[in-house]
Amino acid sequence: MLFPKLSLVLNIVVLIPVCSGLLLKSNWVIDSFGMESPARGILLSIYLAILIFSTYLLFKFDPKFVMSLLFIQVVYKLLSPIMVGSVTNPVIISNLLIALFHSLSIVKLAMTEVRANFICPAISWFDGHQGILAFNSTFNSNEFHFQELMNGTFSPLDFL
């Protein structure tokens, strides 16, 4: 899960100076985010939430939570230029680049989730018994294993 973890690191690396600048009212903040206002305070709270959860998820990685966080970020970052009406603002430019990076992480997470939950009905050619060919997420991503249907007692829940 290197790529999604890099997205979390990117969030942390970008948001520490951005949040610090917003909190300390740095000069560059006015150029990038405008004058101090309630809207800037709300933005800071959103950035802090993303920073906190990115840090947490970096150490307690959960693919579904990471995908959710990154997906929300991609959506708001892609909406930014539409709402602002410009793509020349440095915040908008960085948002679009980060959205691209996070999109690649989302694709990687989605592909991993699909592989981890893949179950395909099959017939065993080895001994003539019916069975289930299923991806086993505990093995190498290219390995599959065969689970027999024993006396009708097999359930897809056996893989959970």
Image (cartoon, rainbow, N blue to C red):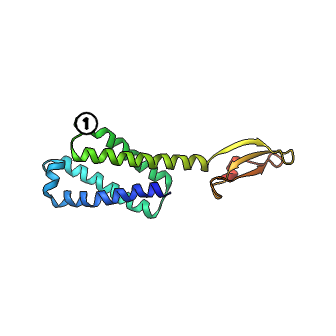
* Front residue of 151 and 142: 142
Residue 140 at x, y percent in the picture: 64, 57
Residue positioned most to the right: 127
Residue 151 at x, y percent in the picture: 84, 47
**What residue is rendered at 28% in x and 61% in y?**
16
Q: Which residue is mark 1?
A: 83
Residue 119 at x, y percent in the picture: 67, 45
Residue 115 at x, y percent in the picture: 60, 48
Q: Quadrant of residue 58?
A: bottom left
Residue 37 visible in the shown view: no
**What residue is rendered at 25% in x and 36% in y?**
83
Number of numbered labels in the structure image:
1
Residue 84 visible in the shown view: yes
The relative height of residue 28 versus residue 121 in the rendered view (above or below) is: below
Which amino acid type corresponds to the residue marked 1 in the rendered image? Met
Graded by Cα atoms within 10 Å as few (under 14), some (14 to 19) or many (20 or more), the crowding at tag 1 reads few
The relative height of residue 123 versus residue 28 in the rendered view (above or below) is: above
Q: Secondary structure at mark 1?
A: helix
* Front residue of 158 and 113: 113
**What residue is rendered at 64% in x and 46% in y?**
118
Q: Is residue 63 left or right of residue 47?
A: right
